[in-house]
């Protein structure tokens, strides 16, 4: 089973990856100019064997936080979502190199993971601010999915949350919990 995150909107939204900061260069430029020791490492040897000219482009991240962001997949076309969402366009949302959970404990014990998660959450709310119109509502929901059913459970009423995006500020702690329905209004 896996924990999945969803956003439901009344209209189509942009898809893709957001928030990551990287440089694009060829395999040969990376192994020559940035990290010559990489030529002796197994992953680079595999790449150079597969692309002997070294002209394949690759993304280079300076830090783990640079790699953190979000990804929004194409809308899901399924009838399974009608019992959860009032909005017709349902997108799967992925935290990349982080999570949608940050706590004070995480900040103390795993500071890099905390920074990556904070960036994922910041990117999520920045994405919503950029792509929502005044008065519009988007529904966020997370749930475990098994191999037979994508939405096996209903939201936990006690976890429901309403966020006014114009007044919302991400603090030091936030968690998008399992089976939590978050209504975001701009």
Image (tube, grey):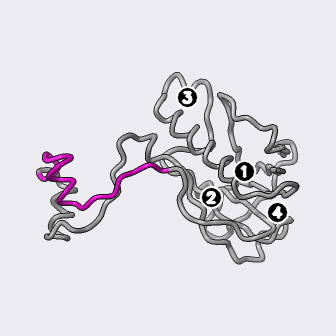
The kind of secondary structure element at disc 2 is strand
**Closer to the camera, 106 or 18?**
18
N-terminal of the two: label 4 or label 2? Answer: 4
Give the residue pinned by disc 4: 84
Which numbered tag is attached to residue 117? none
Mark 4 → mark 1, Cα distance in angstroms: 23 Å
Within 10 Å of disc 2 (Cα), the crowding (few <14, some 14-19, many 20+) is many
Give the residue pinned by disc 2: 93
Q: Which residues are magenta?
A: 20-39
N-terminal of the two: label 3 or label 2? Answer: 2
**Closer to the camera, 114 or 127?**
127
Within 10 Å of disc 4 (Cα), the crowding (few <14, some 14-19, many 20+) is some
Mark 4 → mark 3, Cα distance in angstroms: 31 Å
Eyeballing the image, is 28 above or below 121? below
Mark 3 → mark 2, Cα distance in angstroms: 22 Å
The residue under the point 17% across, 60% down is 28
**Closer to the camera, 29 or 9?**
29
Which numbered tag is attached to residue 129? 1
Q: Nearer the viewer, mark 3 or mark 1?
A: 1
The residue under the point 56% across, 41% down is 119
């Amino acid at each position: 089973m896996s924990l999945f995150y969803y956003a439901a909107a009344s209209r189509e939204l942009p898809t893709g990856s957001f928030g990551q900061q990287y440089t694009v260069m060829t395999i040969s430029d990376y192994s020559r100019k940035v990290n010559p020791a990489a030529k002796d490492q197994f992953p680079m040897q595999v790449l150079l064997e597969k692309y002997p000219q070294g002209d394949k482009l690759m993304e280079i991240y300076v830090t783990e936080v640079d790699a953190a962001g979000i990804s929004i997949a194409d809308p899901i076309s399924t009838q399974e979502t009608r019992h959860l969402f009032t909005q017709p366009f349902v997108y799967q949302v992925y935290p990349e190199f982080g999570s949608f959970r940050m706590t004070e404990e995480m900040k103390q014990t795993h500071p890099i993971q905390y920074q990556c998660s904070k960036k994922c959450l910041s990117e999520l709310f920045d994405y919503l601010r950029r792509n929502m119109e005044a008065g519009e509502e988007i529904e966020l929901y997370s749930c475990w999915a098994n191999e037979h059913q994508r939405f096996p459970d209903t939201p936990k009423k006690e976890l429901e949350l309403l966020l006014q995006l114009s007044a919302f500020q991400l603090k030091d702690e936030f968690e998008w919990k399992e089976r939590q329905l978050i209504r975001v209004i701009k």
